[in-house]
Image: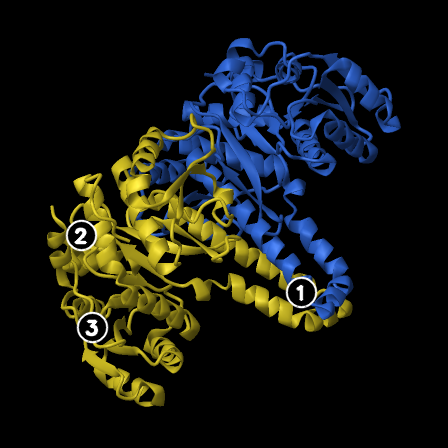
Chain colours: A blue, B yellow
Amino acid sequence: MTDRDVTLSSAPTPDRGDVVVISVDAMGGDRGPAAVVAGMAESAAVNPDIRFIVHGDEAELRRLVGRRKVLAGRCDIRHAGGVVTMEDKPSQIVRKGDGTSMWSAIESVKTGEAGAAVSCGNTGALMALSMLRLRKLPGVNRPAIACLWPSTNPQGFNIMLDVGADIRADAPDLLQYALMGASYARNGLGLDRPRVGLLNVGTEEHKGRAELKQAQDLILAAAEAGRFDYVGFVEGGDLPSSRADVIVTDGFTGNIALKTGEGTAKLVGTLLKDAFANSIMSKFAAVLAMTSLKRLQKRIDPRRVNGGIFLGLNGTVIKSHGSADATGVSAAIKLAFTLARSGFQDRLAARVAQAAASAPGAEAAS
Amino acid sequence: MTDRDVTLSSAPTPDRGDVVVISVDAMGGDRGPAAVVAGMAESAAVNPDIRFIVHGDEAELRRLVGRRKVLAGRCDIRHAGGVVTMEDKPSQIVRKGDGTSMWSAIESVKTGEAGAAVSCGNTGALMALSMLRLRKLPGVNRPAIACLWPSTNPQGFNIMLDVGADIRADAPDLLQYALMGASYARNGLGLDRPRVGLLNVGTEEHKGRAELKQAQDLILAAAEAGRFDYVGFVEGGDLPSSRADVIVTDGFTGNIALKTGEGTAKLVGTLLKDAFANSIMSKFAAVLAMTSLKRLQKRIDPRRVNGGIFLGLNGTVIKSHGSADATGVSAAIKLAFTLARSGFQDRLAARVAQAAASAPGAEAAS
């Protein structure tokens, strides 16, 4: 495989001056199209370079978009009558999902009209449709979903993948996750030389499953050509730490860890609220501390780190949280915009192709 | 296998009126024997019914124990010159660990002198030695480590197992974890009919790994005889929730989830501290809210839920956190005391034997 193949097979990035077009699936989220359009409006208000193609029920979208002045002339509405629900099985959607807004949203990335797609819908169905329509990148066996994790690192976040694209991952899959995660860290977080760690139950060499030891050898060998540093095994406690920028794991473990972290943060938040509601004195204190507490909330607000990105396909697809409100949708759109504008998709494709070809002297991609 | 076999094979519980003897490994923790003896003193001060056998360097222990009046006449010191370090491999310790304080501490449970053992040392070595000396309960394939997880349930905690005894678990192992976890919930948390959930990446029937679907069928079939309710698949976000009291998973996933939860709570704590240190106003607020914040801290303080219990052996062994201070050690000792006094060990053995014999009409154990 050559670099030319890779360039041809990846979706072209739209190039109309500085304008970036994002394809948005308006349906299928828990809060319906109103929340999605509100999120688009939030993004449009702060980002003059963004345009949208929005997919869903035309009459409803026309009404919702018409109410937002900031979206006037920047929003192309595409009718799709079908909606993928949270209960639909991915296998069903693959067979008969072609009239849905989700299918239509992915199609705009496939044709090259949009630089990336965003959907709040059913994760399994979105991954299945994305794989069907965009196809896997040459050299990729299992695509992955990467999430951002609040951390004590200077950039404020770590990247973890896979968080649920596939429940299995062999050693070569984990190597590809490392390469794709490092590329995402460079283009999404602006890290020149990301530090990659492999999630395990201990940091000692002899711990964990056999495939993790194999993966460790593969990742270590690929670090120099992949322009990242491998920091070794990391533990669950390192996910929010500064030991690594990219944490690699299989989709089963990653999904459990992600939801455990979210659940724990939520519990602490609830207990904190209870603590402050406990007495007149502490209620008064809460009022005084409002600014600080809001800053904290902003920092750990899952809506603001909203957006799992699908890596390893011929095109960029962002999965927003199903329950995302306007703020959450806007965060996912911002991530899509950043990645589309950086040319991330082509760089990632080149990086994976380079590793697959195992060419030690290959030209450096990003 | 009959009930009589089970009773004979489990370690006898000491019966001297209300007194319970706990065997304590004083060495091998990150803070050394001083922290351990301080924890024993904390326990002794609030619990007149507790006695200790403490294992480690005799001269040092004599000095440390001598300084604590509350321990006078309640503490039997057993000399053991060897110390298991955090770096020792379990396989080495199994071959030549018989002069260590850890070995000696387990021995006191084996002989029946103590009702339970507590150690802050190397988890892998403690499990390996416990398996070697106490042996697995008849009917148990893989012993497990169970931890307590702060939750919104009325009892304040959920139980999760396995959190790291073994990195693998087949469907029959997961069934045994469910039985042992339910028994622990009854005797340790006082729940009459615990609700058991199986950790997975989604709550839908069709999600997750094949062995989880098999395990689900086994657990469901055993619920009535095991006197627990099976609530189905649960997700990472349910660990601190009120959906279940006992959460069953393999040791790899459980260990990652446990450390992820601890790491997340720690990050939120750090950010909260930063938030309150941010301005004069918020510093003032923090002083006003001190009582509430301390109550919150107490609730989520990992030291107060300290103590992973080894389930599935002929004897009760509690693994305290390696970095436990006096408060942490005291919490682990309290758990050991509660379980030893409740006769938990014999009840668990009977429960597992009953399930292994698959006798539908068997007499109810607890």
Chain hosting mark 3: B
* Residue depicted at 33% across the width and 55% down the height: B184
Residue B230: % across, % down: 39, 39
Quadrant in the picture for the N terminus of chain A: top left
Helix, strand or loop status at disc 1: loop
In this view, the residue in front, B237 or A175, is: B237
Q: Quadrant of residue B325?
A: bottom left
Chain hosting mark 2: B
> Where does label 2 land, which residue?
B136
Q: Amino acid at mark 2?
A: Lys
Helix, strand or loop status at disc 3: loop
Residue B172: % across, % down: 25, 38
Chain hosting mark 1: A
* Residue depicted at 77% across the width and 15% down the height: A77
Is A233 positioned to the left or the right of B28 in the image?
A: right
In the rendered structure, find residue B15 and report the number of the disc placed on it.
3
